[in-house]
Image (cartoon, helix red, strand yellow):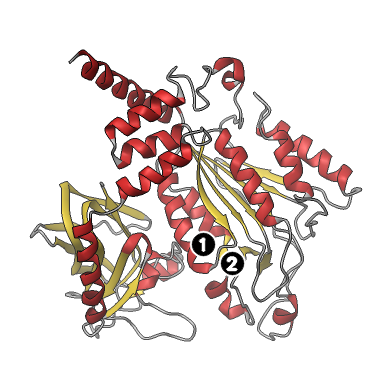
Amino acid sequence: MASIVQRFVLVFAVLFGLALNAHAERRVALVIGNSAYQHVAQLKNPKNDAADLDGRLKSLGFEMFGGTDLDMLAMRQTLIEFGRAAETADVAVFFYAGHGLQIGGINYIVPVDAKLEFESEKDFWLVSLNAVMQQMERGSRTNIVFLDACRDNPFAKQLGGDSRSAVPLKGLASVQTGSGTFIAYATAPDDVASDGAGRNSPFTSALLSHIAVPGQSIDDMMTKVRRDVIDTTGGKQRPWTSSSLVDSFAFAPAAETAAGTGAGTPGGGSGISEKDAFEVAESVGSCGAYEAYVRRFPDSFFADIAREKMKAACAAPATEQVASAAFVTTTRSLAKEGVCEEGPFGVTFCASSVLDPIKTNRYDPSMLFDGNRDTAWVEARPDDGVGETVTLHFNRERLLAGFEIINGYDKDQRTWSNNSRVAALEAATSDGTTLAVSLQDVRGSSKVEFNAPVRTSWLQLRIDGVFRGEKFRDTAISELYPIFAD
């Protein structure tokens, strides 16, 4: 009995210590390095730059997102995941290495499968920096961006031959930062940066050298980075920054030097060793216990074992997997009643109707999960869309706490005002729960939560009332995300 009590106390101490650390400051980072381009010149170093910085930020307490050689779908999915994490974070960092370009003063990063031939198709092939910034600014107070993407425009020849396109400029455009944002470019606006002859680019190499200095402010760090890059490139490349930070920030605060951490506890100061913590996680055996261990001790001897055990613990039971296989057939048949598209996190988005494309603009369900407010699902009824539905089918029963919605066509104020928005809707789930929801007629994200989480295999939203658009009667929703509690 005493042993059980001791183990319970140890579990509580570990989880409580993790909660305290998370409460002190939650740090999230999205790191992307694209090298293996399919239709334009490949780059040697971005994948190395991203891998090396990913490891360095992990050691500094960041929860990591992203990867290397991401295509458009993978980039959108990881951007959604990162945006959700940033919503409850104190600090959000975005690092990108790869091809980047500016069109009309807007900066874009380039997925590895991009095949841009006309400027009018840019939103189908590229990801705008604005879309990334929208995700970062969902909640975090301090937002930091590193862009090692000022190489030659890979589509200069194609866009130069498009009579509808402005002459494509070199490098990236200067960006006005919002409050609490710091942006660092590998070189000055409208200039070109080097990929580098070694493992890393000159900019990332310098960043790796200085980012972990204890107590060093980000401004002092960038001064050293700038000096190193200028020296390495003989003055040809000069990193440039834009800042509107309202708080001081250091990647490695002075209070977190090696002398301040307990032996054998690289994750911080609760005093429990990585071995003891692993044994606690094993005794609990849950998905959350292994996940907590990996977050706390990402580089420990037991981390890989914990990750494997976490996969098994987090996987759906066999009975749910069988149900999932049956579900695939069910969702395919739904296409007869509307339009269905597979989204992230095992969710299929279905809409009862979809407005036909207008020129290059599409309005299908994929617009609901692309992480881009410049796009929207739009219904196709001849009147104002009352009675139309959007249904989210999950690949198994999930514990649903609610959903997040960006109402209307939120591209800009004029587009939002011209089109109708949802004023009232009914949310229904497979367990019979229904919820009447009234939305305010304001731009931006709204969160709707059930009184208690609901176990369900789907969520359906039916439009019961609209705010009439000034010009069009079409009702639009820009983004829609389920909020899971499991």
- Residue 295: image quadrant is top left
Q: Residue at point 41% right, 64% down?
A: 410
| Vertical placement of residue 80 versus 304, above or below | below
Q: Is residue 182 visible?
A: no
Q: Label 1 neighbourhood size at 10 Å, few (<14), some (14-19), many (20+)?
A: many
Numbered tag placed on residue 51 in the rendering: none
Task: Tell me the amino acid under the disc marked 2.
Answer: Pro
* Residue projecting furthest to the right: 234
Image x and y of residue 109, in percent: 62, 63
Which one is nearer the viewer's eye here, 90 or 267?
267
Image x and y of residue 117, in percent: 64, 82
SS state under label 1: helix
Q: Is residue 193 visible?
A: yes
Give the residue at mark 1.
75
* Residue projecting furthest to the top: 2
Q: Label 2 neighbourhood size at 10 Å, few (<14), some (14-19), many (20+)?
A: many
Task: Tell me the amino acid under the disc marked 1.
Answer: Met
SS state under label 2: loop
Horizontal placement of 64 versus 464: left or right? right
Q: CA distance from mark 1 to mark 2?
A: 7 Å
- Residue 340: image quadrant is bottom left
**Given contact means CB atoms under 8 Å apart, are the residues at marks 1 and 2 in contact?**
yes
Which one is nearer the viewer's eye here, 124 or 173?
124
Sequence order check, earlier mark of 1 and 2: 1
Q: Residue at point 77% right, 36% down?
A: 223
Horizontal placement of 330 versus 261: left or right? left
